[in-house]
Structure formats: structure tokens, C-alpha cells
Amino acid sequence: MRSSVGSQKPAIYAAFFGTFIEWYDVVIAGIAASTVWPAVFFAKFSPAVSFMLSMLSYTAMYFARPLAALIFGHMGDRIGRKASLIYTLLTVGVAMFSIALLPPYSEIGLLAPILLLALRFVQGFGIGGEWQGAVSWIYENTENRKGLWTSLMQAANPIGFGLGPLVFMLVEEELNRSAFLSYGWRIPFIIGGAVVVAGIVLRLRMSESVEFNAAKKDGRILEMPSLHVWKSFPYFIALGILVSAFPTAAANLLLNPLGLAYMKALGIPYWVEMYSAILAGFVGFPFVLLGGIMYDKFRRMYLPIITGAAGIIVLSGFYFLIIQTKVALYIILAAVSVFAFLYISFGALGVILCKVFPVNVRYSGIGWTLQIATLITGVLLSFAVPAFVKVSGGLVKAWPYISLSVALLSVLGSLSVLALEKSSSAGQSSR
């Protein structure tokens, strides 16, 4: 018998905190990479090279995530969700504090960017084991309205996405440019580290997942779950990767960090960049819940996913043209609209992935699926976007390739969720 959600409030808060800090980190690191790190850690290079190296430091986290899926997936499916979730958050917290204290290039030379790259990799390793554990825990402890409960946990995403740039903007407004580059930009990372400490305290109070305990009692725990899932469910992983890829790609390519860098290249005021990110995050909160509610109401995987993808496909074709108008209201509305649609898909993503993987490989299955999906975004930012920029003759002219990439991933995600809908029923009945 499952425990009531009400009796597990500390653990729900702990799951929420972890997802919040994951996306808070993503957005503050993206802002720092596009506006601060080129001057702090890569000042000796040309502007173009420093920007590309800064983006590489940002995307280093994506290349750590598949390794995290392997390690934390094994831990989560072998030992338990609680232990894995404590270690993921601890890893993220250590990396955040370390980045906040990292000396600039002017003090330690090349060691500064090297350490930044390494710490971002470590941070990505911790983040890469986080979301799948939190969403699995919520799914396994709720009897009804699983879409709503998992989406409520995922609503930490827009809060983190909105609060990150808000903190950045408030700090920068209180300091002159020199002070902000010296120590001001570090404050959001220190605040994030403090939140991590609170999250760890809450996670120590968590009880183990009800479904996982039942699987352990029944002897269904596997020796190598993180590898076994590839043998038993490769088709689900492949489809899940494509379903999961487009919301992350849209967020990173259309707004943070690439969209913000695009605005900067056009000379759009900094406050417009920040308000775009802040409002896109906060306004997205109800749309995450809408995705979960749509799943609960209609019991169709494809409905929230295709709804979100369709909106992104349409908007991606006009998004950069709207930015080029340099009209603040239009830019902010465009960012909010894009995030509303991607959040509808993201809101249902957790319950969909939990449904297709059984409890004894769920942490691993969702982990591989999501982290490889995010790696696609990392590859796009690290390699494809620089190629687009080079071919086009500058970032401002590269927008058609960026828009097409987002639209293509959204189409693939829509087709994949239809295939996943058909195949998951047979997969469920065979377990």
C-alpha cells in the first residue's frame, strides 16, 4: 500500500528542491557563460574564441550526464532512490561553491578555465543523476493523479529558471561593473549552494520509495540495472531520448544561453534579456502543471507532448525575427510563449517516462533517456552552433539553422511519442 502524499511532505519538498537547484544552476551558469565568464576566465583570447570557450564550459555538464546516468542509475535501482538523491545533491553543492570561489584568469592563468571546465563537468555529473530519481520517487509514492504530482515536482523548473536571472539582475543592479565581474556574479552560485544544503537536510528525512521497497522485498532488484535496461528496453530508451530532447534544446537554443547571447550580439538592452528569462520561467509554472493534468485527464502520452511540440515548431520560425525587431515587449512575449509550450511537454514528460520503465530499472531507464537527450543539446551548443556561426558569417545571421534544429527535434519528438504510445502498452503487459 502506498503512503499518502501528505505524509511524505518533507520528501516531496526535498524532490522539489533538487529539481529547483538543477534548473537554477542551468540558468545562472548560462547567464554567466554568455555575459561574465568570457571576461573573467577567458580574457586573454579574442572575443569570438572567448565566447566559444565559455559556451564549452557551460556545456561541459551535458557531457557528464550519461556517466551520471550509469553510476546513479545503478545506485538508485540497486541501493535505493534516497541514497542516490542525497549523493547527487551533495555533488552539485560542492561544485557550485567551488565555482563561486574559483580565482579568475588574471590570478592563476590557464588553471582558471581548466578548473572551471572540470567543475562544470562535476556539476553536470551531480545534476545528471537528479531529475530521474526525484520524479521516480514521486511517481512511486502516489496512487492517483500521477501526472499532476510529478508535474508539481517538475514545476520547480520554471521557478528555478525564473529566479536565477532575477537574482543575477538584482545583484548586478547593486554593484558597478568592476565589482560585479570581481565578486558579484559569484553570489548567485553561493545562494544556490546554500539551497543545496537545505535540500540535503530534507533528503536525510526522506523515506524510501514504496514501490522500490516492495521490489526489494520481492527479490526483483537486479545486479546491473543500469546495463540491464539497455538489453530489455532499448526501443523505449531510443524513443524516449527523442521525446525528451526538444524541450531542453528549445530552452537552451532559443533563450538561455544562446538566445541571450543572440540578444547581446544585437545590442538589445541587458534588462530585456533578463526580463525575458525571468518571465519565461515564472509564467511557465501553470503550463508545467497543465501538461501533467492533460495526461491525467486523457491518459494519452502524445497529447501534451505534441501540443507543446506544435507550438515550438510554429514559434521557432518567427522567434529570432521577433528578436530582430528589438521591441522589448515583443521579445518578452516571444520568450514567454516558447516556454509556455515547452513546459506543457515537460510537465508530462516525468509521468510518461516513469510509466514505460518498470520499478527495478526505472531510475536507470529514465536516466539514460533524459541524459542522452540533454547531451544532444550539448553537442548542438558545443559543435553545431559554432559551425552555423562560421557558415553564416556571425551569430546574428545563424538563426535559420538554429530555428530549423529546434523545429526538427520537435517533429522527431512528436513522431517518437506516437510510437512510444503504441509500444508501451505491449511493454507493460509483458512485465
Image: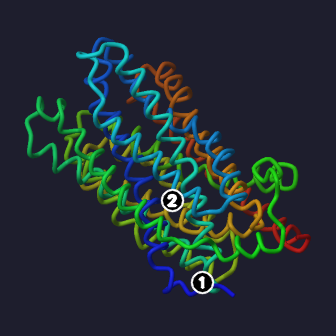
Kind of residue sitting beneath label 2: Leu
**Residue 74 at what x, y percent from top left?**
71, 51
Q: Is residue 271 above or below residue 143?
A: above
**Residue 83 at what x, y percent from top left?**
58, 59
Q: Dot 1: within a 10 Å radius of its alpha carbon, few (fewer than 14), some, or many (20 or more) residues?
A: some
**Residue 246 at what x, y percent from top left?**
58, 50
**Residue 176 at what x, y percent from top left?**
8, 35
Q: Which residue is mark 1?
A: 145
Identified at 54% across, 78% down, the residue is 148
Identified at 37% across, 52% down, the residue is 24
Would residue 145 be visible to someone looking at this image? yes
Residue 191 falls left or right of residue 129: left
Of discs 1 and 2, which sits in the foreground? Answer: 1
Q: Which residue is mark 2?
A: 342
Mark nearer the N terminus (1 vs 2): 1
Please name whichever residue, 224 or 382, is drawn nearer the observer in this view of the structure. Answer: 224
Secondary structure, mark 2, is helix
Q: Is residue 424 above or below residue 164?
A: below
Q: Dot 2: within a 10 Å radius of its alpha carbon, few (fewer than 14), some, or many (20 or more) residues?
A: many
Check whether the beta carbons of the residues at disc 1 and disc 2 lie within 8 A of each other. no
Please name whichever residue, 59 or 120, is drawn nearer the observer in this view of the structure. Answer: 120
As drawn, the residue found furthest toward the right would be 430
Identified at 33% across, 45% down, the residue is 28
Please name whichever residue, 351 or 294, is drawn nearer the observer in this view of the structure. Answer: 351
Q: Is residue 402 above or below residue 373?
A: above
Secondary structure, mark 1, is loop
Where does the N terminus fall, quadrant-wise? Answer: bottom right
Kind of residue sitting beneath label 1: Arg
Residue 123 falls left or right of residue 107: right
Marker disc for residue 84: none
In three-dimensional space, the C-alpha distance between marks 1 and 2, rounded to whole angstroms, equals 21 Å
